[in-house]
Image (cartoon, rainbow, N blue to C red):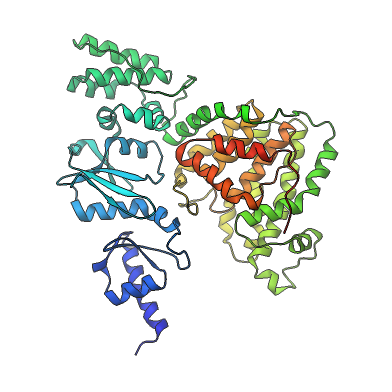
Amino acid sequence: MASPNEKLAQALENLREIQASGRQAIRSADLSRATRELLQKQGFLQEVMKGWYIPARPGGGDGETTAWFASFWGFCRDYLNERFGDGWALTPEQSLVLHAGNQGVPRQLLVRAKGARNRATDLIHGTSIFEGDHTLPAPEDAVELNGLRVFAIVPAMIAAGPSFFELYPTEARTILSMQRDASALLARLLQGGHSTIAGRLAGALRNIGRDREADDILAAMRAAGYDVRESDPFKDNFVRSPYKRDPSPYAHRIRLMWQKMREDIPARFPAPPLRVNDINAYMRQVDDIYVTDAYHSLSIEGYQVNTALIERVRSGAWNPDSNEADREHRNALAARGYWQAFQVVKESIRDVLEGVNPGGVADRNHGAWYRELFAPSVAAGLVKPESLAGYRNGPVYIRSSRHVPLNAEAVRDAMPVFFDLLREESDPAVRIVLGHFIFVYIHPYSDGNGRTGRFLMNVMNAAAGYPWTVVPVQSRAQYMAALEAASVDQDIRLFAAFLAGLIGQPAPQVS
């Protein structure tokens, strides 16, 4: 008779075989009842709805959302393929959201399908799928994004209702910005005689500064005999800016987010000193706050550190070659990496205090901060050396967040744009808030993004004359909720107010 460990090993092998096929939605029929129940009991399988499961990590508990948010799109793809075969597609509006580079998990995924029941199916963690029996895109108007059946961009723009521009202004402007000219849209508009849609798209294009394309649509439709009345479908206050041509939706998205969010930031910050006259005194203050900052920043990321460990690292008494317990202790390695990175960040701070452009400093040096964070773990064999090469080459997910960071290819499109914006930004408060937020929104590294983002924030603080600011671990829930609101709801106000409230406050206590 097989031992309990052997039974679990065999059950895990069965689960691995299913995952190896690329599937994320697992049906009851895919596993025997005994195997399924064993995997559920041990925490390797999580029920999404009756008869449907996803792989999970033990110890997460029923309230842990990370496995679900990481599996959401793959689960929906597999579930819809099983239900409808190839007779389904995401709605035009949801298709455009994905085309615009927003892969955040929606509370309700809107789907068109043949024979749909016109009702919602509840999933877990407040999410659902609504299936509507509506017209599917013609074969030539459909494409796949990561296995999801979606409308192609131009037919989706024709089919999307006016509410799309009001509910998803950043995504709508991103899609409009990707159009090289008006010809593809015009062909569809003329073919279908879509005079109302033509007026809406002309107004939307003019809203983002694409006057030539807006005029082309109006002139062509009127020349064909259609009565077109231009109307701007956007309801927000958006300051037009010069259009930059870029084929990447992610580059447009970062620019548009920056432009939209920056308006909500300056009024929430105290007036900055702007100039530090005694650089050496400022640097001494940075040294004095190291222990407090290291404790809180590492604790926010889940490491268990204390002042004794941090002091041993700083003093050089920490020696992984002679102390096996330290060599194998991830907390000690993280503390050592933080100390090494802190030294390099101090060099960046001195540069900005001497007048070097802070965006340029961060662009040039952030890779070195990241490498120092993880150099000790590489030396100890806990992290692969290639991890220090630069930006990640695979997906990454944020614990308990509906925000899905950009894919690896998109990271390489977005990061140069981010640093251009940071370099060109004139308002110090905007540099502080969006420097931190956009960095962690992109999540360019496989690990250490939060720590690096807080380093970046404090380099921007120094450039403005503000003191080094510690995010207390006691405020972690508020901190993460503010980042979530900015990432998912595109509302930066909570995060701006949170950071502004920390500036100038006494250093938080260390437990």
Whether 93 is drawn above or below 107: the answer is above
Q: In this rendering, would 269 be left or right of 128?
A: right
Residue 459 position, x and y percent, is 69, 39
Q: Which residue is drawn at 54% across and 43% down?
A: 483
Looking at the image, residue 235 sits to the left or right of residue 75; the answer is right
Residue closest to the far left: 115
Q: Please state, as top left, top right, bottom left or bottom right, where the C terminus lies in the image.
A: bottom right
Choose top left, top right, bottom left or bottom right for residue 209: top left
Q: Is 268 located above or below residue 57 in the figure? A: above
Residue 56: x %, y % from top left = 41, 64
Q: Position of residue 440 (x, y in %)?
A: 55, 44
Residue in the image at 40% along x and 44% along y: 103
Q: In this view, does 413 lie above or below 86?
A: above
Q: Which residue lies furthest to the bottom in this view?
A: 1
The answer, for residue 208, to whether it is visible in the render is yes
Residue 137 figure quarter: top left
x%, y% of residue 348? 72, 40
In this image, 381 relative to 99: left or right?
Answer: right
State the residue in front, 436 or 143. Answer: 436
